Amino acid sequence: MKQIVRLIENRLSRVAYGLDSVMSFFSFDCDEDLTEGEETMEAMQEKGIPDKTIKFSTNVLDDFRKNVGKYRAETGGMIASSKDSRLIDECYFDVHSRNTSGTFYYDVESMSEVFREWKANGYETNGIYHSHPIGCIRPSYHDISTALLHLRFFELDYFYLPIFQNERRGFYTMYFYVVRQETDRLNVNLEYVLKATEDGYVYAPFKKWNRDYSIKQLDAYRDGINRQTENVVNKEAENNRYFTKVQTLYPDHVLDKVIICIGTGGARSALENFARCGFRNYILMDADIVSPSNVATQGVFISEMGKKKVEVIRRHIQDINPDARVVCVDRFLDNNMSDEEFKSYMDMFPGRKPTDYLILGCTDNFEAQKRSSVLALKYGTPYLAAMMYKAGAAAELIFVYPGVTESCPRCLLGSRFEKYENGFENDVDSSACTIFATERMNALKGYIALMLLMYHEAPGNVFNDMLDSVKDRNFVQIRLNPNVKDILGIGIFDRVFTGAERYTFMDETVWIPQKPDHPSNGYETCKLCGGTGHLEELYMKWPDTRNINTRRNEE
């Protein structure tokens, strides 16, 4: 957990490479404070003349379209200059910020990491950008006080403070303010207004705006916030106590890994239980809404009808673990989503190696399951998929860890791939499936996920090397009905447990040995991985996984 400290000047002087002491629970409010004096009618009517001395690179302006221009008010991030402070050519959008309808709270960890990286590359971090609700075009008093603190930390005599009014489809109007220190006062000036349009970027007419603020009064205001911060420290300590019984089981660096779930409905209880373990980073991808039929099969509530599944799950995750950061992607993983877009969501959690992500394929759509598995191979991440059989009579789970397991998802499910690639359409849904079957599958899903997330990451822990014991048995089935052979034609349970009938009935699990599809193993060569068993060699192999053709031996 992050340590929150008093944000006073003598503490700042001791911080060399991190923003933690500067940015903990810093916020930008949209409510305009006029204690320094109301604008006169004459000043309001005076036409502003744009000072174009300081400019933005086109790349940065384009990035603004993709983030702050598309999202609701009170989102933003950091900006920097790589060579000339008069050209802003670097930006970082803070996807982990904690926001209200009128306040933007920075995420300490991710912003600090970006700052350190920029500093190492010789960039000068010199501004914060964020959006305000429509009509709030001036920096608030809180904005100015926060700018003063950053100005001191970065040892600058100026600070850039762009305020955005976001519009549809990424269009925006940017009010570019510059904060300058002048002895005992801060001067804040509106340099120009820039509009993003369909055709590019144009300077827009504006009314002149310039104001001075007393540094002494700003410091007094900030001291009051510091006192409130102490209460936040107590709150974080309170959050810690929720996980005291399991804190020795899950190392903190493992809890900081990222769980990416494709299709969230049936996986809901698993996701909520990951939160109970203390896992705090999630990407939830699903465009479905909660419907009446989900009440009996997915653990939803009637009060959630019509709401986005990703949003209600996010609320439950954060109600369990207040430190959780949940990115909700209100989309399906289909051909409308490029690999680049998928990777952009992963990049919202920067500074991680491939095995710091776990992709969960939890949708009943075969094409989405297939795509999620190939994306995991492309980016070198562990992969876990689960599927319930007809009427909940049995369930299957497959898992892949590049460099450890040898069989890829197509090796494991070759006949199924062939069926779908030749026009097969699945009509099996969750009808007549008990909620207990789903929960049983999710329980095993959780255990296997821990096996993948903690592999060689927690020496002495029971999960540290568990994967080594089943790395060649990465196809798993659970018998959830004693008559599964008659219902589905699956006879492996009878074969495996022959002679032990007195002690078995249902709920058994089999971990079925697997080999890569290759002539040396008695199979045709896998059309996806080549059957070599070296899945790590597939890392970044395909330009875009939407274009892989596994119907032939051509890719």
Image (cartoon, rainbow, N blue to C red):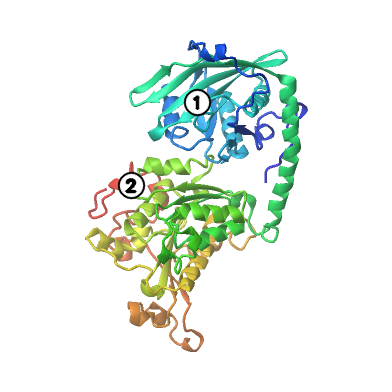
- Specify few, some or many for label 2: CA neighbours under 10 Å numbering under 14, 14-19, or 20 or more: some
Taking the spot 48% from the left edge, 77% from the top edge, the residue there is 507
Q: Closest to the observer: 459 or 26?
A: 26
Determine whether 129 is above or below 192 in the image.
below
Q: Earlier in the sequence, mark 2 or mark 1?
A: 1
**Separation of marks 2 and 1 at Cα, in angstroms:** 30 Å
The answer to whether residue 19 is left or right of residue 293 is right
Taking the spot 51% from the left edge, 13% from the top edge, the residue there is 45
Residue under label 1, please give it: 90
Disc 1 element: strand
Q: Closest to the observer: 250 or 516?
A: 250
Q: Is residue 90 visible?
A: yes
Q: Closest to the observer: 39 or 4?
A: 39
Amino acid found under the numbered disc labelled 2? Thr
Q: Is residue 468 visible?
A: no
Taking the spot 24% from the left edge, 63% from the top edge, the residue there is 424
Q: Position of residue 296 (x, y in %)?
A: 45, 69
Residue under label 2, please give it: 545
Disc 2 element: helix
The answer to whether residue 444 is left or right of residue 340 is right
Amino acid found under the numbered disc labelled 1? Glu
Task: Determine the image quadrant of residue 447.
Answer: bottom right
Q: Position of residue 495 (x, y in %)?
A: 40, 81
Determine whether 536 is above or below 277 in the image.
above
Q: Closest to the observer: 314 or 214?
A: 214
The total number of labels drawn is 2
Q: Which of labels 2 and 1 is toward the front?
A: 1
Q: Position of residue 539 (x, y in %)?
A: 40, 46
The answer to whether residue 99 is left or right of residue 10 is left
- Specify few, some or many for label 1: CA neighbours under 10 Å numbering under 14, 14-19, or 20 or more: many
